[in-house]
Image (tube, coloured by chain):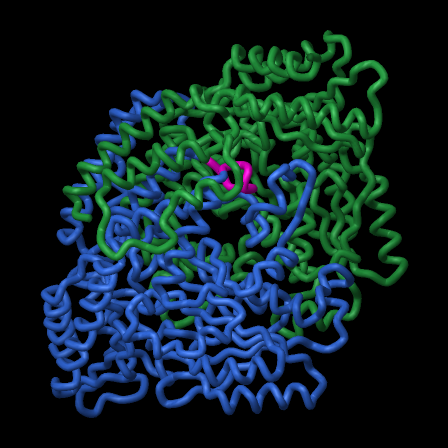
Chain colours: A blue, B green
Amino acid sequence: MTPEEFREAGHRLIDWIADYRSRVEQYPVMAQTEPGAIKARLPTAPPDAPESIDAIIADLDRIVVPGLSHWQHPRFFGYFPCNGSLASVLGDYVSTGLGVLGLAWQSSPALTEIEEVATGWLRQMLGLSDAWHGVIQDTASTSTLIALICARERTTGFCLTRGGLQAESRPLVVYTSAHSHSSVAKAALLAGFGRDNIRTVPHDGTYAMRADALAAAIDDDCRRGALPCAVVATSGSTTSTAFDPLDAIGAITADRSLWFHVDAAMAGSAMILPECRQRWYGIERADSLVVNPHKWLGTAFDCSIYYVRDPQHLVRVMSTNPSYLQSAADGRVNNYRDWGIPLGRRFRALKLWFLIREQGVARLQARLRRDIANANWLGEQVRAAAGWRLLAPISLQTVCVRHEPDGAAGDALDRHTLGWVDRVNRSGAAYLTPATLDGRWMARVSIGAEATERAHVEALWRTMRQEAER
Amino acid sequence: MTPEEFREAGHRLIDWIADYRSRVEQYPVMAQTEPGAIKARLPTAPPDAPESIDAIIADLDRIVVPGLSHWQHPRFFGYFPCNGSLASVLGDYVSTGLGVLGLAWQSSPALTEIEEVATGWLRQMLGLSDAWHGVIQDTASTSTLIALICARERTTGFCLTRGGLQAESRPLVVYTSAHSHSSVAKAALLAGFGRDNIRTVPHDGTYAMRADALAAAIDDDCRRGALPCAVVATSGSTTSTAFDPLDAIGAITADRSLWFHVDAAMAGSAMILPECRQRWYGIERADSLVVNPHKWLGTAFDCSIYYVRDPQHLVRVMSTNPSYLQSAADGRVNNYRDWGIPLGRRFRALKLWFLIREQGVARLQARLRRDIANANWLGEQVRAAAGWRLLAPISLQTVCVRHEPDGAAGDALDRHTLGWVDRVNRSGAAYLTPATLDGRWMARVSIGAEATERAHVEALWRTMRQEAER
């Protein structure tokens, strides 16, 4: 495809995306697709001859769009908000169009330096001190894996330079709560710790980790000859947006020399609001932190920021320096290949830089405040409605709710919950992802899609009542 | 930004990218930037109020473009070709614009099913049997890390469900050659094996791993009580595009029950040419394979395909199944979150799907054949020129070359090589990345940017002679 062909087709696709975003509310939020139905409509073998761009765009309408669940839909209340704000989308278009790669600073200096600037801007927006240094990763799963590998290497004095984790004599242990994200256990398993060495620290009635129980678990492991290595605390849990007590946890990890990682993937965005920051009070005690601007904040996916206080340690764990990657600038610049797993890196800073500039901090703050107010409004409706129950504090924008008809309990209640949530989703009117809390299913309403206004939350509440109470 | 504002600004950015691609040849290939110069031109704090899109686009011209090394430039001969073919760029624009996420099949069915189709098409293009199943990862570094974790878990009978790698009694060992990519050792270290348990198997005069030496190393480790775990072979090494003998290696790993991973990140694209496939004869013996369509083939970065023969094993190593990710379709569909590290996933299949459809297989084959012919042409010039030496066989599109003036040897020769390559790069006329081979620096000419025609290679050769022979 020549640049002139790209110009022509590109204009058409810009219109196509603008139209999609304008009319997204008309689609059923959750895909109404049967497994295998999309595959069945596509050729099993690749074409030998070129196809026209017309044919490809036609397939977007014919095959792709009907097979989507629409995350940018104003009635998307599933999983978590994953806003691809349109200014950020344009930043990503520039990145893909330029097609430059950040293997080393030298391989495109602007890619590295704008990443330093944009992650520094976000750091200030979150109220973090300048002791933190940021780097863009793909997702929090990866950031947490990196954190636990860095913890492993600090605790063992760089076992990777010798016999590796497999040569250590005392088992290293990782501590987290049952409400941490599934990626935390996954990261610990991938990093080689083993399930026997992941401790699930008890939580309190707000689903926050109990610091006293953490201290007891660590001391218990010390007594039995294990080597406590890392604590992963959560600022905003997936199920109910619970906040672990960072200050108390940080005091324990400092005393006992454990790595302290904080997963604020979703809720970290809220820290651009000064009134929310008491929720992660103590964050400056952590060694590493992950915040995903690709969630609520609005940076097009993927853009997960991994902040560390000791970038030298990170580089020492991650660095390789083969001859074909060396340059005269080494030592005077950041080579972000040594700050993570992949060698090749996209120019992802552009989408964050575009978002912050085009929106400005004040507008981003106003949108998040709107969403928090909407969640509190829904919470009030739930509290006031007979037969409905709010199951966890609304700390930000997640509402955990159950309809409990008279007499319904146990498995029958679970069937009722999963039934009405499924009817809501199949109706196309809204998308909710159910989850379990204290062993029972509930509806989890995650508010915060960029397009979601109060009217959409009101419509959701009507639909919920209609499907649950019918 | 509203859809209508996006439409207006999007059209301007499409023109901006089309213009950039049209005029990219006018820029110096390698950025002529001093460390810190870009940062210094940007505000240290984020803006509180919105900025106009005009101001942002103006900064692209004023600050970003002068700070780039231009990977899409026809005289880019550094690192490896990383072609963001314009049809593929459009596919990525659709992905970012839709803003949907693949956590699970249900979270956007088309994302999963088109990934199955597109990786299946590529599998057929590469001449692989239908025993292989593909999934898109970000880079080969990640794919190789996943392969070594899968190897670790197969060899230990899933140690992650127990005490982890740290509880194993016999040290697990990984085998590779000195010519494998730096990401292989990095992956082994991150996976916890430790440097003492990475064996560097000797290579032959063509820089290919010696199968007899591999067998000897494995047997030696068995005798000393270690547990041989995995072999990582390379199909197309970074420095000289050397090919390890897969069939002979596969016979050894099959006999001794080792995991066999093949890194064909760069050169795998060449296997769309039937005449190249004898170079990876034996590939069907491997357990896992990585091929990066984001390199020579032309899919916009990032798009690394990890192929496995036993997806059940991969899923067993990687899966997590918290309540908030379960859906009724589970068990009947692929949930690609369980095929890799990240939970969130972009709709990356679109850029591969667009590329294959818009180009067709025959045109992709023709372009790669053009590049191989250009590399052979350059090789002939080098062979025929006094004082110049070709240092390795030209197996595909990489030419390893040195200018050796009378009497120059040792460190003086290294200084001469690095000097003239640096002069070429600073001139802006071309971009080469030097590397060491047999302990001495040489110029590595990696041909294969989409825009590179014979005339550009001729111009490069004139520049090389001018700067080296002056």
**In-image side of A6 versus A370 (left or right):** right
Residue A235 lies, with reference to residue B252, above or below; the image says below
Residue at point 70% right, 24% down?
A: B400
* Residue B326 in view here: no
* Residue A400 in view here: yes
Q: Magenta includes A103?
A: yes
Residue A240, how many percent across, how many down? 33, 77
Residue B161, how many percent across, how many down? 61, 72
Residue A470 lies, with reference to residue B27, above or below; the image says below
Residue A221 lies, with reference to residue B54, above or below; the image says below
**In-image side of B162 versus B369 (left or right):** right
Write down the quadrant of residue A408 in the picture.
bottom left
Residues A245 and B213: in front is A245
Q: Magenta includes B314?
A: no
Residue A451, how many percent across, how many down? 18, 57
Residues A165 and B46: in front is B46
Q: Which residues are magenta?
A: A100-108
Residue at point 46% right, 88% down?
A: A210
Residue A189, how many percent across, how many down? 58, 68
Residues B25 and A423: in front is B25
Write down the quadrant of residue B442 in the picture.
top right
**In-image side of B309 versus A413 (left or right):** right
